[in-house]
Amino acid sequence: MIFLRADLSQADARIVGVLSKNAQLTELARMKPWEFDTHRHAAELIFQKPQSEISKDERQGSKKIAHGVRYDEQPARISDSLLKDGYIYTEEECDVFRNRYLEALPGILEYQYHTRMLIIRNRYLQDSWGGRIYFKYDRMAPDLYRRGYAWRAAVEVAKILNQKAFIPADRFIKTNALRSKINLQVHDEILISTTPFNDEAWKLACMIKESVEQPRLYDGVELVMPVEFALERRYHSEDQEFKRFPSRDEFNDKLKVVWNERIR
């Protein structure tokens, strides 16, 4: 068996983008994965380098920084978060990074403002599926608002993955008596052990893509969440990745390559 990984593309940033109702962020949220890499773009803004000069570590570090800024983490918290992953930046450096990112993408502040107003006005937040989190007895304070910023994006990502990928994939596998099995769900991706025989992997990938990439309204703003795929011998070995969904022949050719490398 080998792994088929389905990954919601830059999911948190896309959700924040459309919920901000900011034209710049909404446009970026709707761009295709092969057209725009939000993490490399973040690194360009944060480290003030051309994207062609961004290292793998800088791209990875920028993901943590941008994630923290979207949810109003302060420089000390961002510095601590980076340190856990082995990236050493001082609180002062993180303050500079934070300001650069917000200056380039001020729509993030609009997302935070809209979220605060919803909490203050309603004492709850509601996702696009009708689920709610209540703040009836909470004190209105920055820590509470940060919970709200994070919740709005995280719950949408989790429900898309559950309702449009995990559950349909599980049903598809059982209905068609496939050998494949869902092994893991982590935040914005699922991992499926599958086989190169009988087009199982291809059929699963097509089904997940069709299910996930349905237009959805987020507070009145439409978004199609792209899904990316990878074929791997080990989890996140990234042997063969597809930013753009491949043809059947291309997919199966890559599948054979990974399979043959696995059985050597």
Image (cartoon, rainbow, N blue to C red):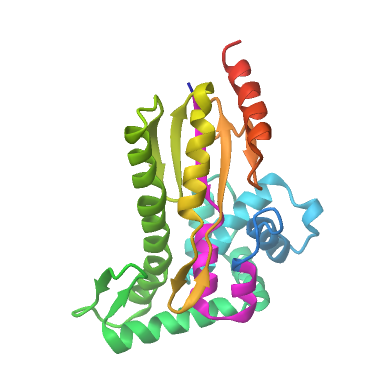
**Which residue is pictured at 69% across the width and 45% down the height?**
56
Relative to 82, say whether 112 is above or below: below
State the image coordinates of residue 20 (x, y, percent, origin top left).
51, 78
Q: Please state which of residues 243 and 90 is positioned toward the viewer in this rendering.
A: 243
Q: Quadrant of residue 172?
A: top left
Relative to 132, say whether 239 is above or below: above
State the image coordinates of residue 42 (x, y, percent, origin top left).
66, 62
Q: Quadrant of residue 114?
A: bottom left
Q: Please state which of residues 30 and 38 is positioned toward the viewer in this rendering.
A: 30
Compared across the picture, whether 203 is left or right of 87 comes to: left
Q: Name the residue at the bottom extreme.
A: 121
Compared across the picture, whether 3 is left or right of 141 comes to: right
Taking the magenta stretch, the answer to whether it contains residue 30 is no
Q: Please state which of residues 242 and 171 is positioned toward the viewer in this rendering.
A: 171
**Which residue is pictured at 37% across the width and 76% down the height?**
145
State the image coordinates of residue 24 (x, y, percent, origin top left).
65, 77
The residue range painted magenta reads: 2-28
Taking the magenta stretch, the answer to whether it contains residue 17 is yes
| Quadrant that contains the C terminus | top right
